[in-house]
Image: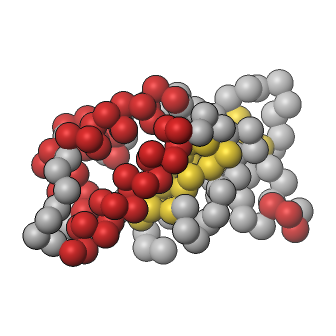
Amino acid sequence: MGIGIHLFLCDIATGRPTDTQNDHQDMSRSPFMPYLYKHSDWIERMFTFEISLTGKELRETEYEPDDPRYFSVDVEDEEDEDFIAGQLWGREELLQFHKELKKVPFPVDNNYLAKEYTKLVSLVNRAVKDQTLTFLMTTM
């Protein structure tokens, strides 16, 4: 994984990625992001952090049992070795992203963009169909 913005398909109840290898999209790979930005101002604002996420924040800091905004995980536990800090998307962001992605035409002339686009659409469709899933957005 490169340094930049990454999306992981996550279980909303646990904040855990469903599969860190396959259910993951590196959003900072060029020329993919410029292609998406060209077709949607909303997507650009989302990935340049102009739009605030409404989902819970996942972090490795002190446990805060009374604060519903956070999942706090003790990363010393072996079962938590796949923990990834970041912010979950709320349902509103997910549905809007789905809507905006539909505006982006399939990149027929570029195999790389077509592969990235197809993977992203697949992940978004899975999350939209299954209300127990959302995205975790993180910078790594």
Q: Considering only vertical position in the picture, is 117 above or below 38? A: below
Left or right of residue 37: residue 101: right
* Residue occupying the point 53% across, 38% down: 129
Dividing the picture into quadrants, the one containing residue 45 is top left
The spot of residue 79 in percent (x, y) is 86, 63
Q: Is residue 37 visible?
A: no
Relative height, residue 24 to residue 112 (above, below):
above
Residue at x 74%, y 38% (from the top left corner): 13
Q: Decide which of 40, 57 is in the foreground and name it.
A: 40
Towards the viewer: 125 or 48: 125
* Occupied quadrant, residue 114: bottom left
* Residue 11 position (above or below residue 74): above
Res 44 quadrant in image: top left
What x and y, as percent, mark residue 118? 34, 61
Residue in the picture at 45% in, 45% down: 125
Q: Position of residue 134 (x, y in %)?
A: 56, 42
- In the picture, measured across the screen, residue 61 lies left or right of residue 31, that is right
* Location of residue 31 with respect to 135 vertically, above or below: below
- Is residue 16 among the parts visible in the rendering? yes
